[in-house]
Image: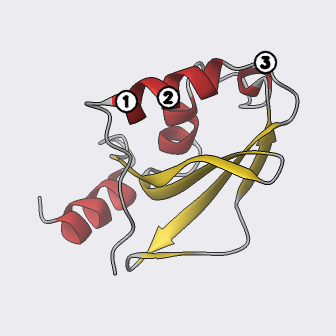
Amino acid sequence: MPLRPINFDNHQGELYLNLLDSKNPRLRLYVYRVVHGKRVKPAMLKLHAPFHHQIGGFRYLEDLLRDKYDGGEFYLMFRRGEKMLLAGAILICPLPHHRGAFEAFKREYGW
């Protein structure tokens, strides 16, 4: 069963942006790599709010995942304590000048 994507055209997109901007110290973000439609454990990133202080000088989480991790498919899970607030997959295209990662992405996703 494929992982459900985060839909940025509705309430989920607004919630995603609000969670990324949150300063609630109880809020956690877990980022997993997705390979062949399956989430790879353990999480490659475990962050706590506010998130922008932890993404290594990148302005947006998506920039970090594209530039440092060569893009691809990722599964994001936002939790506050035991409560899951939002979870889903996102797809990020690598930069074209990262030729190997870019060509692999094109093959994987049918470009």
Residue at 50 percent across and 31 percent down: it is 16
Which residue is the site of mark 2? 15
* 76 shown above or below 105: above
Mark 1 or 3: in front is 1
- Which residue sits at x=59%, y=18%? 59
Kindly identify the amino acid type of the residue bearing the numbered disc 1. Answer: His
Disc 2 residue type (three-letter):
Leu
Measure how far apart labels 1 and 3 are at the Cα level.
Answer: 20 Å
Q: Nearer the viewer, residue 88 or 31?
A: 88
Q: Is residue 75 left or right of residue 80?
A: left
Task: Say which amino acid is labelled 3.
Answer: Lys
The spot of residue 30 in percent (x, y) is: 69, 52
Q: Is residue 43 left or right of residue 67?
A: right
Residue tagged 1: 11
Depicted 73 relative to depicted 37: above or below = above
Q: Position of residue 72 (x, y in %)?
A: 40, 57
**Which badge, 2 or 3, comes first in the chain's sequence?**
2
Q: Which residue is mark 3?
A: 23
Sequence-first disc among 1 and 3: 1
Do the residues bearing badges 2 and 1 touch, measured as CB atoms within 8 Å?
Answer: yes
Q: Is residue 94 above or below residue 27?
A: below
Inter-mark Cα distance, 2 to 3: 14 Å
